[in-house]
Amino acid sequence: MNFQSNLGEFLENEIIYSTPVVKIGKHEWRMIVYPTIYYGNCTMYQFRGIIELSDGIIFRDKWENETNWPKYDSDNGATAGLPKTLSRLYYRYEKEIEKALGEKE
C-alpha cells in the first residue's frame, strides 16, 4: 500500500472511507478517512467545483484537499476557514467515520 506522502497526497484507492457527497454552494464536499505512516488513519475534507448547465449536464472538477480551499486558515480553530455547514456532514456520519479511524491497514 502506498501511504500518504510528505506532500499530503494519496491515491483515490487508498481512501478507507468517504462520506456521501453533499453540495454546498457551487461545490461538492466529502470527508474522507485515509491512512498515514506516522499518525494512523486521519480525516480530511475534500471539495470539487461543479457547473450545472441548463440542459442538466453537470461538469465536476477533480477532488482537492481542504488546504486548497481559498479561505482555508489552519489557525481558525472553529472552522479552519471552511464552510460552517461542513460540521453537519461530520456529525451525520460520525459513527462511520470513527469506525474507519479505528481500522488498521
Image (cartoon, rainbow, N blue to C red):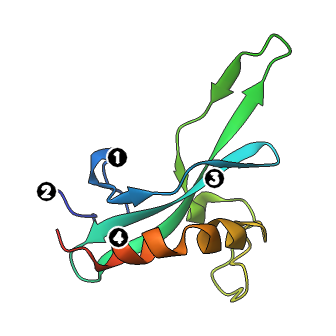
Q: Nearer the viewer, mark 2 or mark 4?
A: 4
Task: In this rendered view, identify the residue nearer to me: 24 or 39.
Answer: 24
**Residue at image mark 2:** 1
Residue 6 visible at all: no
**Residue at image mark 4:** 100
Classify mark 3: helix, strand or loop: strand
Q: Is residue 100 above or below residue 25?
A: below
Q: Nearer the viewer, mark 3 or mark 4?
A: 4
* Left or right: residue 19 compared with residue 13: right
Please identify the quadrant where the N terminus is shown. bottom left
Amino acid at dot 4? Ala
Image marks 4 and 1: residues in contact by CB distance under 8 Å:
no
Residue 14 visible at all: yes
Q: How many marks?
A: 4
Name the residue rendered at 81%, 10% in the picture.
55
Q: CA distance from mark 1 to mark 2?
A: 12 Å
Categorize mark 4 by other alpha carbons within 10 Å: few (<14), some (14-19), many (20+). Answer: many
**Residue at image mark 3:** 29
Q: Is residue 16 above or below residue 39?
A: above
Q: CA distance from mark 3 to mark 4?
A: 18 Å
Task: In this rendered view, identify the residue nearer to me: 87 or 75.
Answer: 87
